[in-house]
């Protein structure tokens, strides 16, 4: 059963603690992404990675860090520097398109992790 | 910076009513356009997409969208909604290199 898994579904942390969200895919996709979803703000890109051991900042990378040691895994760490970490976090993956705009590949999304910082 | 505007934040319709959700984007170059849907408790999934060609695009579950380049719009339509269409709908634009810029979303509630 191919897809993207995110764990845990719900996560609670105390303010000032770092927390790592898991994202695993078995779709053999090269590219992976992390988004943050807030009510009324849609999805905003945090980080993305197109190849193992390489990743780029998205639009709201401050206070977050990622790693891409394996093709299947793209964990996101929410650090204590993130000022407003409570949110719904979505991971996605896609095949790697070329540099042709028309060769865009669909992004597939995981079920998400709802992080609440107390 | 690229941006996507969805004008309707909440829409309430009765079953069998027609649906049109607005989406406008700001980007001067060539873009790819998408509508994603998030049903309650389910993953975000692709509803339809436009790359080039016929500006009227048909997607899953009877949805369609029309790309009007002169208006920078990509509105989503369905002639007759069902209770099962209750969900949040997101318009997204890709200005290139696989990055997606999402709108703020529209919550649709269809009453039986």
Image (cartoon, coloured by chain):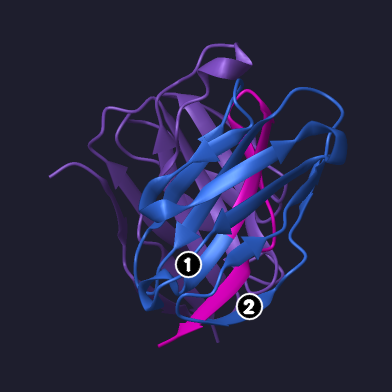
Query: In what quadrant of the picture does the N terminus of chain B appear?
Result: top right
Magenta highlight: main SS: strand
Q: Does residue B94 belong to the magenta stretch?
A: yes
Residue A78 x, y percent position in the rendering = 55, 60
* Left or right of B109, for residue B24: right
Q: Residue at x 48, y 52 (%)?
A: B63
Residue B52 rendering spot, x and y as whole percentages: 61, 21
Q: What subunit carries mark 2? A: B
Camera-side residue of A59 and B40: B40
The alpha-carbon separation of the residues under discs 2 and 1 comes to 14 Å
Label 1 marks a residue whose chain is: B
Q: Residue at x 29, y 35 (%)?
A: A72
Query: Which residue does the numbered mark 1 point to in the structure image?
Result: B80
Q: Which type of secondary structure does the marked residue at label 1 adopt? A: loop
Q: Are marks 2 and 1 on the same chain?
A: yes
Magenta-drawn stretch contains A58: no
Instruction: Please tell me the colour of chain A.
Output: purple
Please, is residue B25 above or below residue B50 in the view?
Answer: below
Judge by depth and name the residue closer to the eye, B31 or A86. Answer: B31
- Circle 2: element type: strand
Q: Is residue A106 above or below residue B10?
A: above
* Region in magenta: B90-112
At a point 58% along the width and 56% down the height, the residue shown is B77
Determine which residue is flagged by label 2.
B11
Give the letter of the blue chain: B
């Amino acid at each position: 059963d191919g897809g993207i898994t995110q764990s845990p579904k719900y996560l609670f942390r105390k303010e000032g603690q770092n927390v790592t969200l898991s994202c695993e895919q078995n779709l053999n996709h090269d590219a992976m992404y992390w988004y943050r979803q807030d009510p009324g703000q849609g999805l905003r890109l945090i980080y993305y990675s197109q190849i193992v051991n390489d990743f780029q900042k998205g639009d709201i990378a401050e206070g977050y860090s990622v790693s891409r040691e394996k093709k299947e895994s793209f964990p996101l760490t929410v650090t204590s520097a993130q000022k407003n970490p409570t949110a719904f976090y979505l991971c996605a993956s896609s095949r790697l398109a070329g540099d042709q705009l028309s060769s865009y590949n669909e992004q597939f999304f995981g079920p998400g992790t709802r992080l609440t910082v107390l | 910076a690229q941006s996507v505007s969805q004008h309707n934040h909440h829409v309430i319709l009765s079953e069998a009513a027609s649906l049109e959700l607005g989406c406008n984007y700001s980007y001067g170059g060539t873009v790819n356009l998408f509508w994603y849907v998030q049903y309650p408790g389910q993953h975000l999934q692709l509803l339809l997409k436009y790359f080039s060609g016929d500006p009227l695009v048909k997607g899953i579950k009877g949805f369609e969208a029309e790309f009007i380049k002169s208006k920078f719009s990509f509105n989503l339509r369905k002639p007759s909604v069902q209770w099962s269409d209750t969900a949040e709908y997101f318009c997204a634009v890709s200005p290139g290199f696989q990055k997606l810029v999402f709108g703020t979303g529209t919550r649709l509630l269809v009453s039986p």
